[in-house]
Image (spheres, coloured by chain):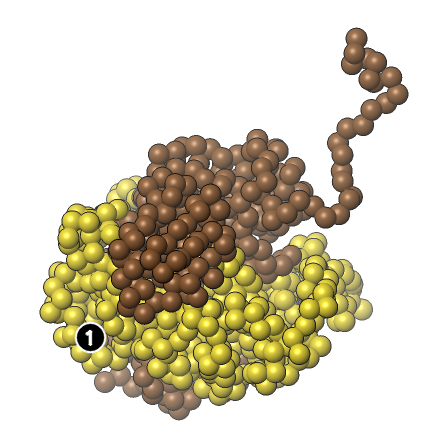
């Protein structure tokens, strides 16, 4: 049994029904001096109510600008084993599916080269290896690539794309999210490993409007599955739900944002021309209703957290595209938008902020994207219109000539 | 020496996902018909083929040792031919085809202290960031609060007795690595003291134009210290403690034990079901850090969840409930005090003023 530091505060967090991260660190500390020091440092933070990490440094593996976050404690004398405690981001398999063999491979690599602590997974979706020294970065990378894994993104590059499990395990997936995610990751390997943008750029692929990967809040490009033909209805199954006690009027019809459903106690009618593809009715009655067969995705742009100019949700660029079939066209549109931002965006300006600054009309026009009413909640309310042309006297006559 | 190194492999990307899919998924890929939740944490997907795929979802602390990874691998071998996955909210899911193995798996998971749940109308795992475990910017810890809150809210994870889903998220500073700003409940670490400027190192470590332009409120000006050092100064009344300056300049830390703490936000969602996605709104501007268990934070969250659960209609997420009952009622029912900090004063603040005479009594 390793000699662990005395951590009365942290020990409180080994109690209770929820799995304890402190127990995890303690377990790793049986073999890792890094984790022992981490326990000591964290206990100190719990006593002092302040973190003890320095601002990151620039470390990485050769030829990559991203994928490693440098981290050093500000108390290296007391906690020498975490004087370096760098993080590696490793690109997760799409949909976060693994075999036991893959997990063991990752565990073995990390036992050899680092603290033995991980995040499964980080916020962007990567596998996170938490804590190693600078000189271990290259050897870890060599073992990872030998096992078929590669690093993810960090800094002002394309971040690791992520996807919901989609067609692998969800009847609502309106396109192949995992394929789109994998293809996008592979197509943009250079952009992912070598920061060349004004700031980060994230893709997230959700198979339906339930958006299990929070793409609309978190991704510069949010791809959300949807459909364009009628919702499929199995009236007998609707009746079964009603017989089983579901109040179809209160719980389904009244919640429909399109106000396009009718229920007479026997038959459910949907006026599909006014359906907003919100998923509610389908979520409530998965056995009776399903998205139609004409499936594809809505593509939105620009979500981000508050830093710097305030939080944004993504907004519509392409109302519907059959992305499985028209993937090249999708990429072409994305690249046109990305090029403009990449050229003209300011340092640390996300594309959503860039669009706010230059105006969505100007941005889409420059990217040669047709302007359509789906892009706005409503037309402008203010009359400060930047008309781009005006006539000089005599112009009209000239035109007639 | 460099000459006889083996060729370095780069840019290979992640392994192809197909390598990790169980046969039942390969056979039914894109051909699932519907699913049912059988009990807390257990669901079954039916293929058009008639095949069934069972999923057992268990809690995970996100911060995991490789030993636990190996435990999960062993369970996957024992019960599901080695196939498992993780969810976007850091739960672990075991993928089974043999229904009779579900209960033994659940028992084994319990023995490992990994309860099952988080499906349907429950509280799923809290997505969160690094906190004091690994980040320089943190105004609070992440894993500690999450553990304390989930211990307290455990019954809502392991049972399905809420009117709708709740998605809780935590970020330990405004950078929001885990974008929490569209969560039913967001726990957000905040600083409350302007950056302390280290004039001795600033010129060496930071690019002054980058620092001044980083400030959303233009509170930072270049200056020269009496000793002749190039540095910056902060107009303190203009600082709203976003720490963006610190992100670009290590000589401007905001971390401060007396003034750091957490804020609580409510009513966001990302799903498009029923209502459009929404941002979370401020419920409680500040709660001091109180490790190891942050009891004031767990009480506040429990209160909000329980008032909502007692009053919401079926399927009504917290934000949808509040939009129906209106915010004055939310403050009244939860007993949370309305303060000056609740009124927005940044860009577009006017859009949040109540611009109608429609009010509840
Ligand atoms: S986003 Fe939709 S398709 Fe993807 S897992 Fe969630 S419900 Fe299924
Ligand atoms: S998907 Fe939404 S908008 Fe369409 S019919 Fe169902 S509830 Fe109404
Ligand atoms: S939210 Fe802030 S403090 Fe927390 S991990 Fe991210 S950058 Fe660090
Ligand atoms: S914390 Fe934010 S508001 Fe305050 S000086 Fe720094 S950048 Fe400006």
Where disc 1 sits, the SS reads: helix
Q: Which chain is yellow?
A: B
Residue beneath label 1, please?
A: B106
The picture quadrant where one finds residue B44 is: bottom left
User: Residue shown at 39%/58% (left/top)?
Assistant: A264
The picture quadrant where one finds residue A237 is: bottom left
User: Residue shown at 52%/67% (left/top)?
Assistant: B320
Q: Which chain does the residue under circle 1 lie in? A: B
Q: Residue furthest top?
A: A401
Percent across and percent down for residue A316 are 53, 45
Percent across and percent down for residue B71 are 20, 71
Percent across and percent down for residue B126 are 41, 71
Percent across and percent down for residue B285 are 62, 77
Q: Residue furthest right?
A: A393
**Between B353 and A131, which is closer to the camera in this rendering?**
B353
For residue A274, side relative to residue A147 (left or right): right
When the figure is inspected, residue B348 is found, relative to residue B319, above or below; the finding is: above
**Between A286 and A354, which is closer to the camera in this rendering?**
A286
**Between A103 and B159, which is closer to the camera in this rendering?**
B159
The picture quadrant where one finds residue B157 is: bottom left
Look at the image and tell me whether residue B86 can be seen.
Answer: no
For residue B281, side relative to residue B219 (left or right): left
User: Residue shown at 36%/60% (left/top)?
Assistant: A265
Number of other residues with Cα within 10 Å of mark 1, as a class: few under 14, some 14 to 19, many 20 or more: some
Q: Which chain is brown?
A: A
When the figure is inspected, residue A108 is found, relative to residue A279, above or below; the finding is: below
When the figure is inspected, residue B227 is found, relative to residue B206, above or below; the finding is: below
The C terminus of chain B: image quadrant: bottom right
Look at the image and tell me whether residue B351 can be seen.
Answer: yes
User: Residue shown at 47%/43% (left/top)?
Assistant: A273
**Between A290 and A339, which is closer to the camera in this rendering?**
A290
């Amino acid at each position: 049994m390793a000699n662990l530091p005395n951590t009365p505060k942290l020990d409180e967090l080994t109690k209770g029904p929820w799995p304890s991260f402190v127990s995890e660190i303690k377990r790793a500390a049986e073999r890792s001096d890094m984790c022992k020091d981490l326990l000591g440092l964290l206990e100190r933070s719990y006593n002092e109510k302040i973190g003890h990490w320095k601002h990151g440094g620039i470390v990485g593996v050769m030829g990559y600008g991203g994928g490693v976050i440098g981290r050093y404690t500000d108390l290296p004398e007391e906690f020498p084993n975490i004087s370096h405690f760098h993080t590696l981001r490793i690109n997760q398999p799409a949909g976060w599916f693994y075999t036991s063999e893959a997990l063991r491979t990752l565990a073995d690599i990390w036992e050899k080269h680092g603290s033995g602590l991980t995040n499964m997974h980080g916020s962007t979706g990567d596998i996170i290896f938490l804590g190693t020294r600078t000189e271990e970065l290259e050897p870890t990378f060599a073992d990872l690539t030998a096992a078929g894994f590669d690093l993810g993104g960090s800094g002002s590059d394309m971040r690791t794309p992520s996807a919901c499990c989609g067609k692998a395990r969800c009847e609502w997936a309106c396109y192949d999210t995992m394929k789109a995610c994998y293809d996008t990751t592979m197509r943009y390997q250079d952009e992912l490993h070598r920061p060349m943008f004004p700031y980060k750029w994230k893709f997230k692929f959700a198979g339906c409007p339930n958006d299990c990967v929070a793409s609309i809040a978190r991704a510069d490009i949010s791809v959300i599955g949807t459909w364009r033909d009628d919702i499929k209805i199995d009236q007998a199954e609707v009746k079964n739900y009603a017989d089983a006690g579901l109040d179809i009027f209160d719980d389904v019809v009244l919640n429909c944002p399109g106000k396009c459903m009718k229920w007479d106690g026997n038959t459910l009618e949907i006026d599909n021309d006014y359906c907003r593809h919100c998923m509610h009715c389908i979520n409530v009655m998965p056995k009776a209703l399903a998205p139609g067969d004409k499936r594809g995705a809505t593509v939105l742009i620009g979500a981000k957290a508050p830093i710097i100019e305030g939080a944004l949700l993504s907004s519509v660029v392409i109302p519907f595209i059959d992305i499985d079939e028209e993937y090249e066209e999708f990429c072409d549109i994305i690249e046109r938008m990305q090029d403009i931002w990449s050229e003209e965006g300011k340092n640390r300006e996300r594309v959503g902020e860039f669009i706010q600054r230059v105006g969505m009309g100007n941005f889409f026009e420059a990217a040669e994207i047709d302007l359509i009413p789906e892009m706005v909640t409503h037309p402008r309310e203010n009359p400060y219109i930047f008309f781009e042309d005006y006539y000089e006297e005599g112009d009209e006559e000239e035109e007639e000539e | 020496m460099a000459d006889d190194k083996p060729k370095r492999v780069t840019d290979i990307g992640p392994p192809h996902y197909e390598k990790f899919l169980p046969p039942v998924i390969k056979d039914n890929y894109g051909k699932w018909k519907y699913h049912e939740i059988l009990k807390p944490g257990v669901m079954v997907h039916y293929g058009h083929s008639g095949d069934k795929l069972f999923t057992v979802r268990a809690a995970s602390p996100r911060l995991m040792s490789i030993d636990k990874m190996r435990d999960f691998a062993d369970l996957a071998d024992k019960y599901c031919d080695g196939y498992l996955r993780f969810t976007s909210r850091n739960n672990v899911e075991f993928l089974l085809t043999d229904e009779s193995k579900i209960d033994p798996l659940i028992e084994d998971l319990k023995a490992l202290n990994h309860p099952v749940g988080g499906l349907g109308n429950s509280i799923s795992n809290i997505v969160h960031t690094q906190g004091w475990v690994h980040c320089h910017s943190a105004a609070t810890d992440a894993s500690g609060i999450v553990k304390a809150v989930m211990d307290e809210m455990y019954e809502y994870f392991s049972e399905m007795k809420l009117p709708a889903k709740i998605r809780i998220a935590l970020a330990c500073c405004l950078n929001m690595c885990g974008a929490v700003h569209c969560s039913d409940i967001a726990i957000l670490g905040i600083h409350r003291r302007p950056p302390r400027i280290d004039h001795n190192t600033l010129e060496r470590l930071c690019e002054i134009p980058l620092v001044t332009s980083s400030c959303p409120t233009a509170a930072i000006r270049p200056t020269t210290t009496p000793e002749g050092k190039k540095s910056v100064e902060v107009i303190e009344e203009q600082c709203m403690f976003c720490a963006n300056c610190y992100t670009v300049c290590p000589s401007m830390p905001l971390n401060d034990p007396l003034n750091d703490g957490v804020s609580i936000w409510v009513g966001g969602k990302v799903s498009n079901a029923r209502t459009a996605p929404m941002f979370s709104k401020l419920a409680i501007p500040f709660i001091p850090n109180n490790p190891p268990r942050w009891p004031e934070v767990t009480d506040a969250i429990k209160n909000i969840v329980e008032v909502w659960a007692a009053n919401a209609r079926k399927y009504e997420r917290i934000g949808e409930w509040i939009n129906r009952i209106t915010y004055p009622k939310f403050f009244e029912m939860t007993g949370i005090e309305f303060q000056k900090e609740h009124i927005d004063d940044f860009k577009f603040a006017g859009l949040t003023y109540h611009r109608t005479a429609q009010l509840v009594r």
